[in-house]
Amino acid sequence: MPLQIRLVTGIHCHLCEQAKAILQPLLSARQMQLLELNIEDDPAVAELYGLRIPVVLFPDGSEKGWPFTSAQIARMLNQLG
């Protein structure tokens, strides 16, 4: 199963769309999957991240909140191995 990166998003979130545009090419090149977690779908996720979206959640437990660059995400992905 490919490694999954989660992106905490929200409805009508233009920053989330920008985040996806940064993430998609990086993940595609590494054959990784992007799983979106919408704060509208889970009250616990909304409580944790509702005011900070978009937030990238990495499998090692690390997080990167917006704003972020492609280079920053690439470095974090490289640290995953």
Image (cartoon, rainbow, N blue to C red):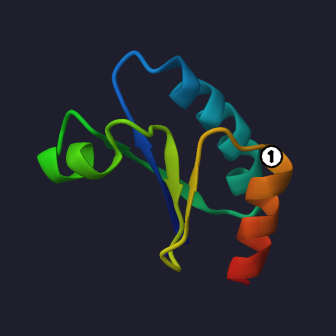
Q: Where in the figure is residue 69, as x and y percent of width and height?
A: 78, 43
List x then y, in percent, for residue 56: 53, 53
The quadrant of the picture occupied by the C terminus is bottom right
Check disc 1 and report the residue beneath it. 70
Position in image of residue 44 (x %, y %): 17, 53
- Mark 1 neighbour class, 10 Å CA radius: few under 14, some 14 to 19, many 20 or more: some
Quarter of the figure with residue 62:
bottom right
The image shows residue 3, relative to residue 11, as above or below, that is: below
In this view, the residue in front, 39 or 36, is 39
Left or right: 21 as drawn, with respect to 12? right
The amino acid type, in three-letter code, at marker 1 is Ser
Residue 60 placement (x, y as % from top left):
53, 80
Instruction: Confirm whether residue 29 shows in the render.
Output: no
The residue lying at 45 percent from left, 21 percent from top is: 13
Q: Is residue 50 left or right of residue 65?
A: left
Q: Is residue 75 above or below residue 53?
A: below
Which residue is at a point 86% across and 52% down the rendered structure image? 71
* Viewer-side residue, 80 vs 15: 15
